[in-house]
Amino acid sequence: MAGKIPDFNATARAGTGKGAARQARRDGLVPGVVYGGEKDPQAINVEFKVLLKALKAGRFMSTLFNLKVEGQDDVRVICRGVQRHVVKDLPTHIDLLRLHRNTRINLFIPVEFINEETSVGLKKGGTITAVRNEVELKVTADNIPESIIVDLADLDIGDIVHISDIDLPKGSRPMITDRDFVIANITEPSALKSGDDEDEDDVVETDEASEGDETPAEE
């Protein structure tokens, strides 16, 4: 579960338009905008190094932040978009959405597998097949899960994990509600599959050999 809401610092940007945005980038800043929450949009700047570090840390788009702008009240926000340079792939603009504690939003939450080292099926040589690496959930702003946990400890070869098998945080539900979709499964070892195929071939070859060795009946 999400713990203490991390701070995200920004400064108010007086100018708007392409000219002000270019100047911000020359100053080592990334221009952005904060919108929503029944308030007017606000232009902001974020330090390039700070934003890049946050992006590299992962799960930036699914993290709730406490936005701090000097002279203004703190507000909860979540990132709804990061524009990047087409060649350098570096952030050039950021969009933040204001949220209330009880605001419900749709987010893609990554799937995390635990206890692989003690998994019954994996110890037998099975393979974990992740059907979904992330799942879209409707969550409340004050209870955003960092990940969806799949415990592999008691799973054996042939076991399947459905979304109904996952303990979701209070107030969260999957966006897909018309079916109990699969998250992952543990398949049998490839060597075992190959062995089965070889056995079948041996049977066929033996049968064919037997037919060829038959001695014609004397007339």
Image: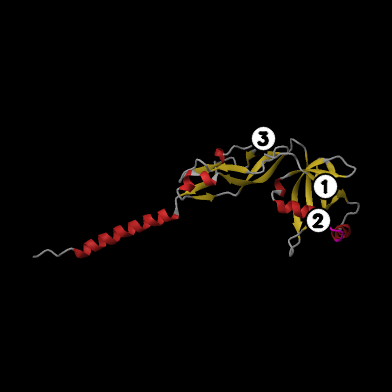
Q: Is residue 173 visible?
A: yes
Given this view, does label 1 or label 3 mark the residue nearer the observer? Answer: 1
| Circle 2 residues within 10 Å: few <14, some 14–19, many ≥20 | many
Image location (x, y in percent) of residue 39:
84, 42
Residue at 62%, 37% in the rendered image = 168
Find numbered disc 2 in the image and state the secondary structure of the residue it sits on: helix
Q: Which quadrant: the C terminus?
A: bottom left
Image location (x, y in percent) of residue 213:
20, 64
| Magenta residues (range) | 26-30
Magenta segment includes 104: no
Find numbered disc 3 in the image and state the secondary structure of the residue it sits on: loop
Distance CA(mark 3)–CA(mark 2): 34 Å
Image location (x, y in percent) of residue 65:
77, 43
Residue at 52%, 50% in the rendered image = 129
Residue that badge 1 annotates: 9
Name the quadrant containing residue 196.
bottom left
Residue at 47%, 47% in the rendered image = 123
The one nearer the camera, 182 or 50, is 50
Q: Residue 89, labelled with which disc?
A: none
Residue that badge 2 annotates: 48
Residue at 25%, 59% in the rendered image = 207
Distance CA(mark 1)–CA(mark 3): 28 Å
| Circle 3 residues within 10 Å: few <14, some 14–19, many ≥20 | some
- What is the count of numbered marks? 3
Residue that badge 3 annotates: 171
Mark 3 or mark 2: name the one nearer the start of the chain: 2
**Badge 2 amino acid:** Phe
Does 152 sit left or right of 216 as displayed?
right
